[in-house]
């Protein structure tokens, strides 16, 4: 859960997006609104979140023969367990 919630307009979000992201990185949840209606919510990502695409790439690199069948979830879980170092995503400019 975010440390605090900020409500801003679409205009403000578009004009100061770098500042919005800085606030999210600092722990805030930002609700972007059109008038009084919420359009989007930005919140800090959960730590060590690994996307399915990353898991599939790792499985392939480790020679997995995982397929999208009834046991797919078990195969993905096994691939993740075999490669447990923390995800360290790149910093974007």
Image (cartoon, helix red, strand yellow):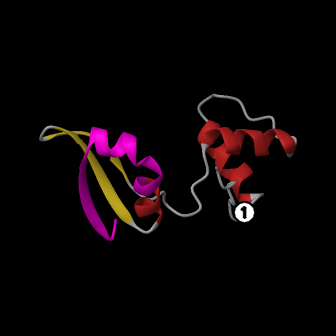
Asked if residue 11 lies in the magenta stretch, the reply is: yes
Residue 82: x, y in percent?
Answer: 77, 58
The residue that disc 1 covers is 84
Does 48 sit left or right of 55 as displayed? left
Residue 91 placement: quadrant: bottom right
For residue 40, say whether it is visible.
no
Q: Nearer the viewer, residue 48 or 72?
A: 48
Q: Is residue 12 left or right of residue 21?
A: left
Q: Which quarter of the rendered picture does the N terminus lie within? A: bottom left
Q: Position of residue 40 (x, y in %)?
A: 31, 41
What span is colored magenta in the figure?
Answer: 1-20
Q: Is residue 15 above or below residue 20?
A: above
From the top left corner, tell me how far across and down residue 81 is, in percent.
71, 58
Residue 18, compared with residue 57, is above or below; it is below
Q: Is residue 76 magenta?
A: no
What's the residue at 35%, 64% (across, down)? 28
From the viewer's perspective, tell me whether residue 47 is left or right of residue 88: left
Q: Is residue 61 visible?
A: yes
Could you say which is closer to the camera, residue 91 or residue 80?
Answer: 91
Please identify the residue farthest to the left as the structure is shown: 36
Residue at the (73%, 49%) spot, across then down = 79
Q: Residue at the spot x=40%, y=62% of the render?
A: 23
Q: Nearer the viewer, residue 60 or 44?
A: 44
Front residue of 75/30: it is 30
Residue at disc 1, secondary structure: loop
Q: Position of residue 61 (x, y in %)?
A: 86, 43
């Amino acid at each position: 859960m975010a440390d605090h919630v900020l409500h801003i307009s679409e205009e403000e979000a578009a004009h100061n997006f770098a500042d919005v992201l800085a606030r999210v990185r600092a722990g805030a949840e930002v609700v972007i609104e059109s008038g009084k209606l919420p359009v989007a919510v930005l919140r800090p990502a959960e730590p060590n979140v690994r996307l399915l695409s990353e898991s599939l790439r790792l499985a392939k690199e480790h020679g997995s023969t995982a397929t999208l069948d009834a046991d797919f979830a078990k195969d993905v879980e096994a691939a993740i367990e075999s490669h447990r170092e923390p995800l360290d995503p790149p910093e974007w400019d």
